[in-house]
Amino acid sequence: MGEKKVFNKLVRDNMVEIIKEHKAIPKIRIIDNEEYISSLKDKLYEEINEFFESDNDINELADIKEVFNALCVAKGHTLAEVEKAREIKAKKRGGFEKKIFLIETIEE
């Protein structure tokens, strides 16, 4: 019997087939929506950490966006709704284009 690797994490939909192509036997379970949302949040942290540690930013940003998109849908929001909320917030508070770094404030 070969080496056993434990993952205990949400994986992309095609991973079962990819694992089988690599001559390994995946043990999986289908999770409910509550655990799915929790697992997506964990996955988002994982992908953000990989982004910080990576030299290949574009692939890590793509992974972050994929998890973000799935999280939006799982929480019952369309991407259009999220974009509209982003636009409203950006109109009210602005974006990050001006690269403003707040050092401190002093109360008057």
Image (tube, grey):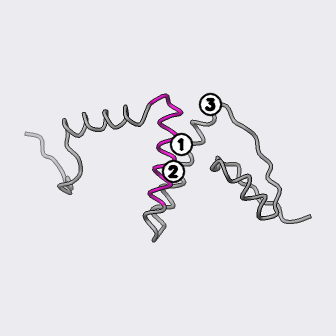
Which amino acid, mark 1?
Answer: Lys
Report the quarter where the C terminus lies.
top left
**Element type where label 2 sits in the image:** helix
Q: Viewer-proximal residue, 36 or 58?
A: 58
Q: Secondary structure at mark 3?
A: helix
The crowding category of the residue bearing disc 2, from other C-alpha atoms within 10 Å (few below 14, some 14 to 19, many at least 20), is: some
Tell me where the magenta segment starts and ends, as one range.
60-77
Q: Amino acid at mark 3?
A: Asn
Indicate the position of residue 79 as horizontal and vertical percent values: 41, 37
Q: What numbered label is drawn on residue 45?
A: 2
Left/right of residue 34 with respect to residue 55 in the rendered view: right
What residue is pinned by disc 1? 41
Please tell me whether residue 90 is drawn above or below residue 6 in the rendered image. Answer: above
The residue shown at (51%, 46%) is: 67
Task: Name the residue tied to disc 3.
Answer: 33
Q: Could you say where residue 9 lies in the image, as x and y percent from the top left?
A: 66, 48
Give the mark nearest the N terminus, 3 or 2.
3
Residue located at (69% from left, 35% from top): 31
